[in-house]
Image (cartoon, rainbow, N blue to C red):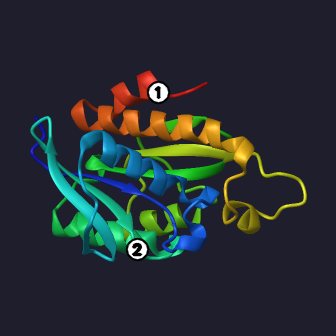
Amino acid sequence: MDQSLFLIAGLGNPGREYARSYHNIGFMALDRLAQRLQIPVDRARFHGIYGLSKVAGRSVMLLKPATYMNLSGDSIAEAARFYKVPPENILVLYDDIDIPLGKIRIREAGGPGTHNGMRSVVSRLGTDNFPRIRIGIGPLPEHFDIVSYVLRPVADAHVPELNEAIEQSAAAAEVFIREDIMKAMNRYNQR
């Protein structure tokens, strides 16, 4: 069994005005995971809010960067360096406009795509070789630019689908912690 810490980070923007936005789906999924695992996320450090506990004999840190999205990597990299977390034990949960609304995609590694938060994470970690769960918020509606869409509150009509995606993401993250990323991919990747 891996004795290294598992670092699970959800991406989002701090502040009430963004709390229910599409861009904060990563925070919402991390909050759901914290509920499932009964880990309070209430300590301040690493430019974020975090919680630490044991799950199935493994040390687990849940982290919500308190930076704005495009600086998320500062928080995650600082925590990863402090705890000497290998990249394969880092899991990032975040929204993805290129995935249909309510669907999730789990990957073992890969580039950041167009997501500024993930660009920051990849840059600050110095690698893209870490697992991630992408939560679909797409496609981009007509007459919207990406920024105005992702920062607006989730439309009421989208809440049921996104709640299901958040639940699936949290469940997949728990499988990652208890078992491994391949089992999470096999069980939760949606075609």
Instruction: Report which quarter residue 127 is drawn in.
Output: bottom left
Question: Could you tell me residue 2's position as x and y percent?
Answer: 13, 40
Question: Could you tell me residue 163's position as x and y percent?
Answer: 55, 40
Between residues 152 and 98, which one lies in front from this camera angle? 152
Considering only vertical position in the picture, is 71 above or below 172? below
Label of residue 188 in the image: 1
Q: Residue at 48% of width from left, 72% of height from top?
A: 14
Q: Residue at 68% of width from left, 40% of height from top?
A: 101
* Left or right: 115 as drawn, with respect to 169: right
Please identify, in this view, whether the residue under mark 2 or under mark 1 is nearer the observer: 2
* Residue type, mark 1 in image: Tyr
Mark closest to the chain's N terminus, 2 or 1: 2
Q: Quadrant of the C terminus?
A: top right
* Left or right: 30 as drawn, with respect to 101: left
Question: Could you tell me residue 164's position as x and y percent?
Answer: 55, 34
Q: Residue at 60% of width from left, 55% of height from top?
A: 113
Label 2 crowding class (10 Å Cα cut-off): few <14, some 14-19, many 20+? many
Q: CA distance from mark 2 to mark 1?
A: 28 Å
Residue 99 appears in the picture as rendered: no
Label 1 crowding class (10 Å Cα cut-off): few <14, some 14-19, many 20+? many
Between residues 152 and 117, which one lies in front from this camera angle? 152
